């Protein structure tokens, strides 16, 4: 009887914790809204779309870069534009971002256009959130209604970026844990990994798979052999690691489910990509079945991706009187 009562108390506490977290999540979503700038900056979405379109016309890769900026922002300190700050010890110089994160000048251009239309009203983090959505849409993906009303943070967190951002070298359990730390589940892991259907990656992020992988004397056995040969030629041992390869082989710029089809045939570029289908943990969770479902059902992937982006965009935003509206996305207001 004692044990039964103790179990009941434990379950009741767990239930209360879940209910509190749900309530807090509901409060955040209530503070963010799709029409936040309807009165104060009615042309905001049109302005951002035009600037993103111009940037992608100049360089198609920029769509992936802007999407990645939003991802790397929200995983550190929440969605607060901390990644945009120019600081000696800022997130830009963290290991996952240095010589890698890009698109800052596009955000600057968008901010300038927005400020010309409605000065001091729109946060840099909301601009980044809209730009990420538009990057997907302009690459052929689905649209979704972006929740707005975030404010910009005052500090960057280089340590948080170094330890909190998922890495291409992480094991799948570590990746799942890093997503869980910001309130995202395994469906979000797989769906958001699908962002790798566009963009490029430097040799430094995958060359560990090409030569003497884990002491085997050869390439990663889960990597397609013809792809391994191509990548070895692109990224020789003597390379500086800065050459780039497409993340989604044979489908570089189209936002679709081809990335998942590649995983099924050993053509995932990053180790963290291929683990979604080849690791034991993928087998024992819903991850492998999700990859298989997304590979054959584009609509399912695009719908889940949109939902996961909305969830990610709601990670610990500053709202109300918290934070500020930066005049320049690179520095806090004086």
Image (cartoon, helix red, strand yellow):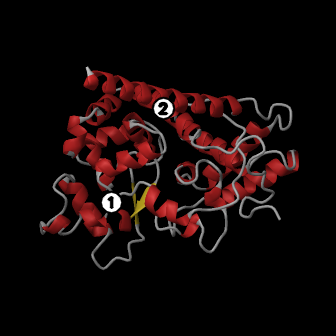
Front one among 333 and 289: 333
Q: Give the x, y percent position of residue 59.
A: 58, 55
* Precedes in sequence: disc 1 or disc 2: 2
Q: Is 106 situated left or right of 239 in this image?
A: right
- How many residues crowd around disc 1 within 10 Å: few (fewer than 14), some, or many (20 or more)? some
How far apart, in angstroms, are the residues tagged by discs 1 and 2?
A: 33 Å
Total numbered labels placed on residues in the image: 2
Give SS at disc 1: loop
Q: Quadrant of the C terminus?
A: bottom right
Q: Give the x, y percent position of residue 130.
A: 66, 41
Residues at discs 1 and 2 in contact (Cβ within 8 Å): no
Q: Give the x, y percent position of residue 256.
A: 43, 36
Q: Mark 1 = which residue?
A: 169
Note whether 243 is above or below 66 in the view shown. below
Q: Is residue 55 visible?
A: yes
- How many residues crowd around disc 2 within 10 Å: few (fewer than 14), some, or many (20 or more)? few
What residue sits 39% from the left and 41% below the top? 189
Q: Quadrant of residue 136?
A: top right
Q: Is 90 situated left or right of 273 in this image?
A: right
């Amino acid at each position: 009887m004692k044990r039964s009562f103790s179990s009941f108390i434990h379950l009741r506490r767990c239930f209360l914790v879940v209910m509190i977290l749900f309530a807090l999540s509901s409060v955040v979503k209530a503070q963010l809204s799709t029409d936040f700038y309807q009165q104060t900056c009615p042309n905001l979405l049109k302005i951002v779309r035009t600037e993103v379109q111009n940037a992608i016309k100049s360089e198609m890769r920029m769509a992936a870069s802007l999407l990645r900026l939003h991802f790397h922002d929200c995983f550190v300190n929440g969605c607060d534009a901390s990644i945009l700050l120019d600081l000696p010890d800022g997130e830009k110089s963290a290991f996952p971002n240095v010589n890698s994160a890009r698109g800052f000048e596009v955000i600057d251009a968008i901010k300038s256009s927005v400020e010309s239309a409605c000065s001091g009203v729109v946060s840099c983090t909301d601009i980044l959130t809209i730009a990420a959505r538009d990057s997907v849409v302009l690459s052929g993906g689905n649209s979704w209604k972006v929740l707005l009303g975030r404010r910009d943070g005052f500090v960057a967190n280089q340590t948080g970026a170094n330890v909190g951002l998922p890495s291409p070298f992480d094991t799948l359990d570590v990746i799942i844990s890093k997503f869980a730390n910001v309130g995202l589940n395994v469906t979000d892991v797989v769906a958001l990994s699908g962002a790798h259907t566009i963009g490029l990656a430097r040799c430094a992020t995958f060359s560990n798979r090409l030569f003497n992988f884990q002491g085997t004397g050869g390439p990663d056995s889960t990597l397609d052999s013809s792809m391994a040969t191509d990548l070895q030629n692109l990224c020789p041992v003597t390379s500086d690691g800065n050459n780039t390869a497409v993340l989604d082989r044979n489908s570089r710029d189209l936002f679709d489910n081809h990335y998942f089809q590649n995983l099924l045939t050993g053509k995932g570029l990053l180790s963290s990509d291929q683990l979604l289908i080849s690791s034991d943990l993928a087998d024992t969770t819903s991850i492998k079945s999700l990859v298989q479902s997304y590979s054959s059902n584009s609509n399912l992937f695009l719908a889940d991706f949109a939902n996961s982006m909305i969830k990610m965009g709601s990670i610990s935003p500053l709202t109300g009187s918290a934070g500020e509206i930066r005049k320049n996305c690179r520095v806090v207001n004086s």
